[in-house]
Image: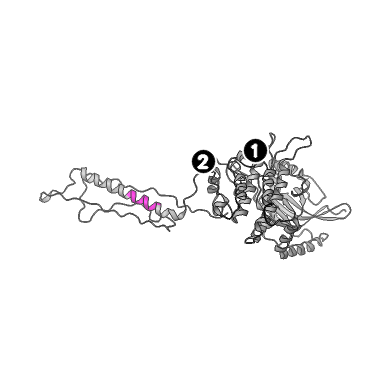
Amino acid sequence: MNEPKYRRIIELGHGGMATVTLTAMRSTHGVTKLVVVKELHAELAADPECRAMFLDEARLAARLNHPNVVQMFEIVDHVGEASDDGLEGVCALVMEYLEGQPLNRFRSKLKGDPRALSFYLAVIIEALSGIDYAHTLVDYQGAPLHIVHRDISPHNVFVTYAGEVKVLDFGIAKANDASSKPTESGAVKGKLAYMAPEQARGDRVDARADVFACGVMLWEAAVGRRLWAGMNDAAIIYRLTQGEMPSPRDEDPSVPEKLDAIIRRALAREANDRYPSAAALRDDLEAFVATLPEKTSRRALGGIVSSLFEEQRAEVRRVIEIEVGRVNDVSAHRPLPKLPIPKESSSYTDQASTGSTGIKQATATTIAPPPVPSSRVGWIVGAVGALVAVAAIATVATVLIVRPGNNATSNGSTTTTTPAATAPQSSETQATPASASAVEPKSSATATPKATHGKPPAIAPPKPSTKPIDVGY
C-alpha cells in the first residue's frame, strides 16, 4: 500500500472557518516537504454555498505567483468522495510553509528601537509590491481581474528569517468584476481597525481600499501606537465616515513632514483623493526612504528578525524535527500537537480564526456618534438635573400662585411659600450617573399650604445611558 501524499503533523490553528495544520507532503520520489494545509470545517464544506465560495476564492488566490505573496500549491476538494492522499473528504488549500514572524509581533519586539521606523518602512514597501501585483493581475485573455485583498494588516504581512516579506491570506480576496458576488448582506470581511470607510459601510471596494489599510499601518509605524487604540467599533466607524483622521504630526511632531504627507494622502476619506495604486504609494515611500541616513537591506531585515526571535525559532524547529520523525508512526492518528508559539503569531490562521468581523453594514445616516467619555457623564448629569429642578420649582410656584384658595388669609396677611430644591452634585470623576434619579422639589416645612385642587404632576429628568465604553479590541 502506498503512503499517503499528505500527513498532518502539527496543528497551527483552529478557528471558526478552518483548521490549519503543518503537513508533510511526499512526492513520488520519496521527498518530504513541509507545507501548510487549511481545511474548511466539515459543516461548512457540507454547505454548497460556503464550499463554492471557498473554492472560488481559492482558485483566485492560486493564480498569484510573486515573491512577496505566499505561494499556493494545490486546491483539494474531496468532499463526498474517496481519496488516498491523506486528505479524504475535505476541502482544503495547500500553501508554502514560511519560517519567520508576522509584522505585528516584529513591531512589538522593535518598540523603542531607533531603527524601528526604517525596518517597518522596508517591510511595507516590499508588501506593497506584492499587493500591487495582485491588483494588476490579468486573466489568460489579458482582462484585468481587479483583485482586492480586503484584509491587509500587520497580521497578514509576514517577515521570514531570510528577510523576505510575504503577504498572506488572499483567501478572502475578491475579483471585483461583474461576475463576482457581493459580500454577504450584513457582514463586512476584514479587520475594522484597518478598513477604508467604503469597506466599513459595505460598499463595493477597489484597490484603493488596500491602499488605505497600508496607510493605517504607516500611521502606526510613524506614531508608534495603534491608530484606533481604545475605541470600540461604533466609534471607529463614526470617525471613518466623518473623515476624522488625525495627522501623524499632530500626534508626534517629530514625524517628518514628507512622511506625514504620504500617510495623509493614503488615508484620505474619499477613494479618489488617495493614491491611485499600491505602486504609486510604494514609489513615494521609496523616494522618502532614500533621504534617510540608514538604509535597510533584506539581509539586515532577516538578521534582526532572527536575533529577536532566536529562542522561539529554535524551539519550533525542535518540535518540528520530533514530529517529522514520527510521520511513519502507526499511531499517527493520535491528537496533533500544537506548535509552541504565541497565538497571535500563527498568521496562517487569521482568516480561520476571524473570517468576518461580523460588523453590520453601515451608512452615514445610521451611525450613532461615539459614546460620551465617562469622565464627562457626571458633569452632564449634574447640569441636566439642575435644569430639571429649576423647571420643577417654576411649575410649582406658578400653580401655587394662580390656584384659588392657596393664599393664607388669617390675620389679613398673605404668607408666601418658597419651595426648596436640591440639585444633584456634579463631579468630573463620576463614572456612572448615580445621582441622576428624579429630583422632587421639596417645600419648606413651616410654609407648606394645603393644596385644594390636586398635586402638580411630578417631573423626572431623562435618564442618560450608563453603558460603559468598550476599550478592548
In front here: 66 or 458? 66
- Could you tell me which residue is drawn at 66 percent across and 59 percent down? 115
Q: Could you classify mark 2 by the number of other residues whose Cα lies within 10 Å: few (under 14), some (14-19), or many (20 or more)?
A: few
- SS at circle 2: loop
Residue 349 percent across, percent down from the top left? 69, 53
| Residue 450 seen from this side | yes
Q: Do the residues labelled 2 and 1 touch (CB within 8 Å)?
A: no
Q: In which quarter of the image is residue 362?
A: top right
Q: What stretch is highlighted in magenta?
A: 380-388
Rendered residue at 88%/51% (across/down): 28
The x, y position of residue 82, in whole percent, is 80, 47
Residue 247 rendering spot, x and y as whole percentages: 56, 49
Q: Is residue 357 visible?
A: no
Q: Which amino acid, by three-letter code, is at mark 1? A: Pro
In the rendered image, residue 210, in percent from the top left (x then y), is placed at 65, 44
Mark identifier at residue 182: 1
Give the labeled residue for mark 2: 366
- The colouring scheme, among rainbow, by chain, secondary structure or one colour, is one colour
Q: Identity of the amino acid at label 2? A: Thr
Q: How far apart are marks 2 and 1 (CA)?
A: 21 Å
The image quadrant that residue 186 belongs to is top right
Would you place residue 109 above or below residue 135 in this image? below
**Could you tell whether 127 is left or right of 197 in the image?**
right
